[in-house]
Every structure is written in C-alpha cells, then in structure tokens.
Amino acid sequence: MQNKIYPLKTILDTISKYKKPDVKKRMIFDQSPVGGIGSKWVIALFFSIPLLEYALIFNPYVFNMLGIAQAIIFFVVFLSVVMILIFTLTVINNAKVVKKITPSWNHYFPDIDLKLIVTSGASPYKAFYSHYAEALNRGVSEEGLHAHLKNAFEIMQNENRELLDAMENDRSR
C-alpha cells in the first residue's frame, strides 16, 4: 500500500498551531488535517472523563452505598488512573500522527528526522517553529514554504554543528 504524500502545510498543521504572529508546537497533535480525529475532540474527551467519573461515584445511589469517605477515596484513586489513561492516550495519539506524516515528511526533507522537530528536549532544530512562523507571516506559497524551510534547516545545522556531530557520534557507537 502506497502512503499518501500530504502537502507540507498539512503536515505542519498536525504538529503545530499558528496564531499570528507565532507558531507553537501542539501538546496533543491534530489528526484532522490527515483524515483523523481533531485535537479539539480529543481534548473534549479528556475533560469529560473526570466529569463522568464524578457523576458515577457521587450520584445518589452509589454515594449512599459508599458513604462520603469511601466515595472520596474512590474518586482520588480512580482520578489517578484517569490521569495515567490521559497521558497514555496522548502518547498514542502523537505517535500515530508522527507515523502517519513521516513518509510525507521524508518526501520533503529526507535528511531531517521528524522526531527531532517534534521533540521537547534539546534539538539542533529548536528554532524550527520560529522559521516556520516567519514563512507564514510572509504568506509564502507551498513551494516557497518548502524552499524557506530547506534554507532554515541549513542555517540551523550550521548554527548547531557541534550538537549534530555529537548526535552522529552517539549513533555510530
């Protein structure tokens, strides 16, 4: 099965949010540009789970069976399970988005690892979102965006040569 090549702007819309004049990395990646569930629906689900838990534990029938102390203990214990569930679902969602857009990303930038763009840690491409915002603020076309980002990657690689060399040495071990 051949992977669909998404436009560069679509790829970047899944992992970033543009509010003029800034671009920020999404905490929960958006699947809707590539035919999946939108991040707003995922966030709505995340907010509804604790409310549903509250309704299930503190309704009159269950509350009378448990009493106040046990109801509070159940709520706190299950709320910790809900937080773990939300974290796990976020990781799964983000991994699914990255897996889906990686073939398209490799089409545009075969030498740049997408995981280095979406990482929250130290990366030679930490200024990527600034360069992307600059291109969007200028209103460049799809081809212009590709050319601008290619040039930006060269600049970032030159600025962070030591970090890239250290990463290459670590991979070669």
Image (cartoon, rainbow, N blue to C red):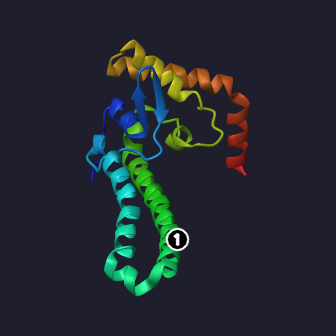
Tell me the residue at 51%/28% (across/down): 129
Q: In terms of depth relative to the viewer, which is nearer, 24 or 144?
A: 24
Q: How would you rate the neighbour count of disc 1 (Cα within 10 Å): few for under 14, some for 14-19, many for 20 or more?
A: few
Tell me the residue at 39%/87% (across/down): 65
> What residue sits right under mark 1 in the picture?
76
Tell me the residue at 53%/76% (across/down): 73
| Residue 98 at x, y percent in the picture | 43, 47
| Residue 130 at x, y percent in the picture | 53, 24
Q: In terms of depth relative to the viewer, which is nearer, 65 or 82?
A: 65
| Residue 109 at x, y percent in the picture | 46, 33
| Residue 50 at x, y percent in the picture | 41, 63
Residue 4 seen in the current view: no
Q: Using the image, determine if residue 61 lies above or below residue 130.
A: below
Identified by mark 1, the residue type is Val
Q: Secondary structure at mark 1?
A: helix
Q: Using the image, determine if residue 122 lies above or below residue 135.
A: below
Q: Using the image, determine if residue 39 lies above or below residue 156.
A: below
Tell me the residue at 68%/41% (across/down): 168
